[in-house]
Amino acid sequence: MSKSVAILQSNYIPWKGYFDIIHRVDEFILYDDMQYTRRDWRNRNKIKTPQGVQWLTIPVEVKGKYEQKIKDTLVSRSDWAETHWKTLLHNYRKAPHFGDYAGALQGLYEQAGQQPALSGINYLFLKAICGWLGITTRITWSMDYQLAAGKTERLVDLCQQAGAAHYLSGPAARAYIDEALFAAAGIALEFMDYSGYPEYPQLYPPFEHGVSVLDLLFQTGADAPRFMKSFAR
């Protein structure tokens, strides 16, 4: 069977679509050699509250570090983890399955509060949530590989080093990926389709798809995969 790979920057407690990409491939490469971008998904994500959607943001050191890489981005305060945990507790304790994850999640936040680097924090949550969803995909780092020059060239080269015949990309990459380079290398290129997700019972209407996967887990528990696309294949 041909090997499939996806390559994405690490995100903080990402939405369900991110985990669908992980589940769809044999190896998921965290691309934290890329430049850290402000006001992006690297250090923040959304949750539902009675007042509407709210951001949970990890404070990071950015002053004067405009070209730093994600892997080099450090947390600026350690109290963020306790604040995030209390915010989740306050807004989701009435969710049907919050109690299924509360103990483990509180422990994760205690661990995360001791982590100095954003990449390490994101990895901690990604691995735990994959476990809760039953996703067993191998997760590696771009730092484990040699990196070629050029935007698409680097992705193609990473696929070749990983022994992949199929590359699954996020849809936003259509804007810059040179599809001809994948074709020339004999690597099948596919863009993830995020359309058509079913709704699930959610606190605080109106329904919002683009929130952290924690929302789905707290609301549906072990049934969460039923509301994701990769498990229906």
Image: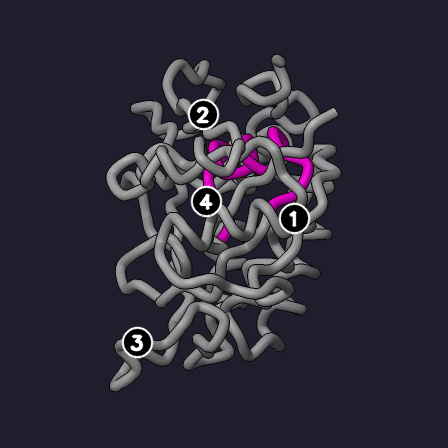
- Inspect this view and state whether residue 102 appears: no
In this view, the mark in front (4 or 3): 3
Reading the chain from its start, which is encountered first: label 1 or label 3? 3
Reading the chain from its start, which is encountered first: label 4 or label 3? 3
The residue beneath circle 2 is 202
Q: Which residues are magenta?
A: 12-28
State if disc 3 and disc 4 touch (CB < 8 Å): no
The secondary structure type at the circle numbered 2 is: loop
Residue at the far front: name it: 184
Image coordinates for residue 204, horizontal then vertical, percent: 36, 30
Residue at the far bottom: name it: 64
- Left or right: residue 201 versus residue 98 is left
Depth check: give the residue in front, 89 or 104: 104
Depth check: give the residue in front, 52 or 77: 77
| 27 lies above or below 117 | above
What amino acid type is highlighted by mark number 1?
Ala
Q: Name which residue lies at 66% across and 21% down.
A: 223
- Left or right: residue 194 versus residue 86 is left
Q: Name which residue lies at 62% across and 77% down.
A: 114
The secondary structure type at the circle numbered 1 is: helix
Depth check: give the residue in front, 151 or 49: 151
Of the 4 image quadrants, the one containing the C terminus is top right
Reading the chain from its start, which is encountered first: label 3 or label 2? 3
Depth check: give the residue in front, 69 or 3: 3
Residue 91 is labelled as 4
Residue 162 is labelled as 1
State if disc 3 and disc 1 touch (CB < 8 Å): no
Image coordinates for residue 187, horizontal then vertical, percent: 53, 33
